[in-house]
Amino acid sequence: MKLSQEKNEILDKLNFISIDKISKKTVPDSPGIYFFRLKDNSQFNTFENDKNDRISYIGKHESSLRERLFENHLNIYNNFSTFRRSVGSILKQNLSLSAYPRISKKTGKINSYSIFSFAKLKKIKEDKGVFIYDFDNFDDEIKLNEWIIYNFQFSFLKVNDMLIEDDLKKNEHEMRHMFKPALNCNHDDDYNEFRDRIKRLRKICANECRLNFKEN
């Protein structure tokens, strides 16, 4: 099957629903690949990705698509959502968001991509992006949540719906390269023309997060 044919076949299987219309019953409690798509009438500071069906983000979850959406991407209290932080970095000025270190509810310490004490955090070089930032307070997080809910659509493919192979990691990788989502910015996402801009905007948030770091 040609890539273009395969892409169209996958698009036919994707039933995008506005996030404000989604309930927990809509999303299966099972593994799969998920897709965020910007609505046709929504503006996103030039990150609309019109050339690629307005697909903004593609991810996977090995156990529960429902958990990933509701307990991570839409959770204003405790999330580690790359998608959410990228959207916030793009809308930082529009929504007047301030980036702060994320504090663990369990330990009261700063969450980072590795386990560091406060003392070690002070010694980390500026080029190491170890801070996980969120935004200043729940009001900021609620503003971001509302924007995501009313401007994005969501769809998914369960494992049994896959058109390629029963391998989530491989399917996610291939679908990212197929749809070229605007917000995926990992080391292997060279296809993404927005990647460097996303990284710069996230860097602004990370730097602000460092400035706002205060040891208790």
Image (cartoon, grey):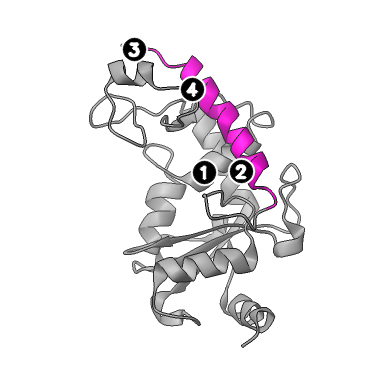
Residue type, mark 1 in image: Arg
Mark 4 vs mark 2, CA separation in Å? 31 Å
Q: Residue 118 sits in which quadrant? A: top left
Q: Nearer the viewer, mark 1 or mark 2?
A: 1
Q: Which residue is mark 1?
A: 84
Tag 3 or tag 2, which sits nearer the N-term?
A: 2
Q: Sort mark 2 into few (<14), some (14-19) or many (20+) by Cα contacts within 10 Å.
A: some
Which residue is tagged 4? 126
On screen, 134 above or below 177? above
User: Which region is colored magenta?
Assistant: 193-216
Given the image, on which type of amino acid does mark 3 rest?
Glu
Q: Report whether 107 appears left or right of 215.
A: left
Helix, strand or loop status at disc 4: loop
Q: Residue beneath label 3, please?
A: 215
Q: Earlier in the sequence, mark 4 or mark 2?
A: 4
- Location of residue 109 in the rendering, given as x and y in whole percent from the top left corner: 29, 24
Query: Pointer 4 and pointer 1: residues touching (CB < 8 Å)?
Result: no
Vertical relation: 199 (above or below) 36: above
For mark 1, does the 10 Å Cα neighbourhood hold few (<14), some (14 to 19), or many (20 or more) residues? Answer: many
Of pointers 1 and 3, the one earlier in the residue sequence: 1
Q: Indicate the quadrant containing the N terminus: top left, top right, bottom left or bottom right.
A: bottom right
**Which quadrant: the C terminus?**
top left
Instruction: Identify the residue at image location x=42%, y=74%.
Output: 158
Location of residue 96 in the rendering, given as x and y in whole percent from the top left corner: 63, 26
